[in-house]
């Protein structure tokens, strides 16, 4: 990967998985946002991943939908026990509150959940190191990011 996502996107991927927002098929996934307002499409061909989520499409790094797919495919570790702590988190609302400062948003959620931030960040660091090593290419999806449903 040429560009890496903020490490906190791993938490958003955890939420997508534990909330069952990822519908994975043989060669595609549909991933609903944490508030259910949008659905993103992730496609892959060998080690090339495409997605129309905002991070992947506009920023050029693997957004949480791509990270969630990589976890479900077994290419990245998934800690079920830790992930269960992030069930039903509305990341869209929290990230908006902190003006897309993902570190501050994650810290607030971790504290509200009564978790040890150092332990959580150590686990995220291990996943992040594996993400760095993946021989994959990230490309924007062929579809533009969806607009929020009303």
Image: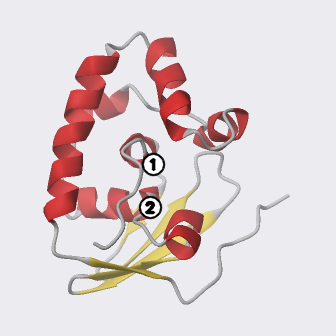
Q: Which mark is residue 58?
A: none
- Location of residue 24 in the rendering, given as x and y in whole percent from the top left corner: 36, 68
Q: How is the image coloured?
A: secondary structure
For label 2, the crowd category at 10 Å Cα-Cα, with few meaning under 14, some 14 to 19 and many 20 or more, is: many
Q: Which residue was labeled with disc 2?
A: 65
Of tags 1 and 2, the one toward the viewer is: 2
Which image quadrant: the N terminus? bottom left
Furthest residue to the top?
114
Give above or below for 44 relative to 131: below
Residue closer to the observer: 21 or 99: 99
Residue shown at 48% from the left, 30% from the top: 106
Q: Position of residue 7 (x, y in %)?
A: 36, 45
- Seen as rendered, the residue at the extreme right is 150
Task: Return the disc, 1 or 2, that comes first in the chain's sequence.
Answer: 1
Q: CA distance from mark 1 to mark 2?
A: 8 Å
Mark 1 lies on a secondary structure that is helix
């Amino acid at each position: 990967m040429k560009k890496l996502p903020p490490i906190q996107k791993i938490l958003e991927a955890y939420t997508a998985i534990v909330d069952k927002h990822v519908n994975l098929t043989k060669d595609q996934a549909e991933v609903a946002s944490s508030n259910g307002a949008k659905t993103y499409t992730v496609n892959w061909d060998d080690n090339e991943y495409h997605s129309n989520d905002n991070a992947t499409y506009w920023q050029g790094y693997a957004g949480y939908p791509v990270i969630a797919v990589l976890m479900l495919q077994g290419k990245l570790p998934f800690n079920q026990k830790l992930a269960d702590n992030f069930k039903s988190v509305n990341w869209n609302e929290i990230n908006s509150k902190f003006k897309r400062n993902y570190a501050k948003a994650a810290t607030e959620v971790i504290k509200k959940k009564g978790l040890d931030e150092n332990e959580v960040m150590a686990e995220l660091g291990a996943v992040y190191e594996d993400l760095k090593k993946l021989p994959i290419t990230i490309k924007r999806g062929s579809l533009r990011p969806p607009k929020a449903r009303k």
